[in-house]
Amino acid sequence: MANIVEATLQNFDSLLKSELPVLIDFWAPWCGPCRTLSPIVDELAGELEGKLIVAKCNVDENQDIAMKYGVMSIPTLVMLKSGQEAMRTVGAMPKARLAAEISKAL
């Protein structure tokens, strides 16, 4: 299983300084589509290990981060490269479509 980081206010700045792109999964435990997307993100994290860092950000516990990135609905995935947004998807989607979106942004 890939190393998936829990994004919090305490570690967020260090994530932004990563040399690898960072894919942040904004989610909440009560969100049905988030629970559908989560195993897909986990699979892709394993397949893309070494190419990007995957972080999960619980919006209930980290509202400041969600607000900073303008997350209005979940699940939202945001890829950051050198601290700048390179990709954003909103809503659950099939693995192949998500993989294609990530590949375009890498």
Image (spheres, helix red, strand yellow):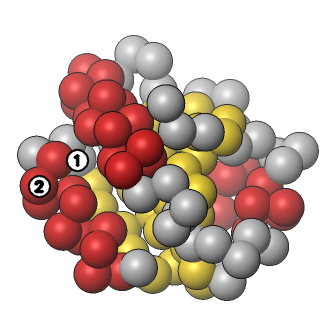
Residue under the point 84% across and 63% down: 13
Q: Secondary structure at mark 1?
A: loop
Label 1 sits on residue: 91
Which quadrant would residue 88 be assigned to in this image? bottom left
> Identity of the amino acid at label 1?
Gly
Residue at 50% x, 54% y: name it.
Answer: 49
Does the image show residue 2?
A: yes
Toward the viewer: 51 or 100? 51
Of residues 38 and 106, the one drawn nearer to the viewer in this rendering = 106
Q: Where the C terminus falls, by quadrant?
A: bottom left
Count every numbered label the image shows and give the total. 2
Q: Horizontal and vertical percent for residue 34?
A: 32, 31
In the image: residue 78, left or right of residue 61 = left
Q: Position of residue 105 (x, y in %)?
A: 36, 80
Identify the secondary structure beneath mark 2.
Answer: helix
Q: Residue at x 40, y 36 (%)?
A: 42
Q: Write down the residue under mark 2.
A: 96
Q: Position of residue 27 (x, y in %)?
A: 45, 35
Give the mark, 2 or 1, whose residue is nearer the N terminus: 1
Residue at image x 76%, y 41%?
8
Describe residue 93's horizontal placement relative to residue 55 as left or right.
left
Q: Is residue 29 above or below residue 91?
A: above
Residues packed near mark 2 inside 10 Å, few (<14), some (14 to 19) or many (20 plus): few
Q: Is residue 72 visible?
A: no
